[in-house]
Amino acid sequence: MKTISTKKELRLALSLAAERGENSGLVPTMGALHNGHLSLIKRAIEENSLAIVSIFVNPSQFNDKKDLENYPRDNDKDLSMLGELLRKNDIVFLPEVDEMYPGEESISYDFGKLDKVLEGAHRPGHFNGVAQIVSKLLELVQADNAYFGEKDLQQLLIIKKLVGQMDCRTNIIPCPIIREKDGLAMSSRNILLSPEEREQATAISRSLFEAAEMQDKLNPQGTRVQVIKKIERAKGLELEYFEIADGEDLNPVMNWEDAGNIFALIAVRLGKVRLIDNIRLK
Ligand code: AMP
């Protein structure tokens, strides 16, 4: 694999790859890699002759400065994991902040209601920051395919919308959530949990699995109320939201027949750590 830290070097490597007739797959990450990331990367390798993995903790998507400071970073470990997976010509793009944001960032995006609910409501400015960095990466790499996890479902929907607005040729490929054996969705933030919080965190995915079971007996709002009651009784968990929503626009649904895709989405805090998860109910 090649490790590249400047846009100039990356453009050169990509133009040489284009001359060789390679098709390319981009996997944007913020590092502290785990098997969730690796599943996206493996898919990019399978489906493209050139894979580009970016590792960049994007400051503009953090609404909380402390969260940015505490975000886990381990480039050495990431590079050794990638070294085992990537092929000779595959690229790891590891830019510094100044390389991605050389000047003031003034662009703001309009995603209608989609960036105002759920994560958008609890993390003001978060999706604008996500859109800034993802649009930069998509423009820079001009990949055939880009891989994003369904773990961040709202982000995935926003990126699909962004690509439409940018008139970008890259296909956005959604990838399923990878979980730990006990159900906890893999996340770079999981390593910030104390052993006790790690144990308590299993209640997050459990609440989603329970919602999936309740749907035969209860309507969406009844399910929501029951699940919220359970989460509020769970030790250590501070609930930010639990919603049952249309998988296209994330509007709350009243009946199971109201939408083709219905998801339960959750965000909780355990001490200082904020975790999100979701499950497809229908
Ligand atoms: P992050 O480094 O957290 O920004 O994540 C980079 C990409 O990996 C995003 O597209 C995430 O949705 C995806 N991702 C993170 N965790 C998981 C997981 N447990 N399963 C599948 N994809 C994931």
Image (cartoon, rainbow, N blue to C red):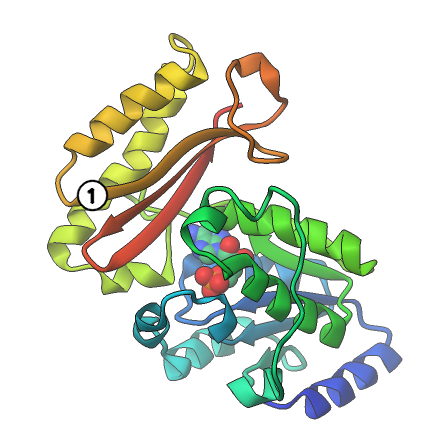
Residue displayed at 79% across by 80% down = 17
Q: Is residue 60 above or below residue 171?
A: below
Left or right of 168 on screen, residue 241: left
Q: Position of residue 72 (x, y in %)?
A: 33, 72
| Residue drawn at (62%, 68%) of the image | 132
Instruction: Judge left or right: residue 105 versus residue 193.
Output: right
Q: Tell me which residue sits at (75%, 67%) in the image.
A: 143
Quick check: can you spot residue 1? no
- The quarter of the image holding the C terminus is top right
Query: Measured along the vertical axis of the image, is residue 95 above or below residue 58?
Result: below
- Where's residue 267, x and y in %? 35, 44
234 relative to 84 in the view: left or right = left
The reply to whether residue 35 is in sight is yes
> How many numbered badges does the structure rendering display?
1
Task: Name the one closer to the observer, 1 or 280.
Answer: 280
Q: Quadrant of residue 92?
A: bottom right
**Residue 110 placement (x, y as % from top left):** 67, 53
| Disc 1 element | strand
Image quadrant for the N terminus?
bottom right
Q: Label 1 sits on what residue type?
A: Leu
Residue 115: percent from left, percent from top: 57, 48
Q: What residue occupies the far top of the structure in this picture?
A: 217
Against 58, residue 44 (above or below) is: above
Mark 1 highlights which residue? 237
Is disc 1's CB within 8 Å of ligand 1?
A: no
Query: What residue is rendered at 54% in x and 83% in y?
Result: 94
Q: Residues within 10 Å of mark 1 (few under 14, many from 20)?
A: many
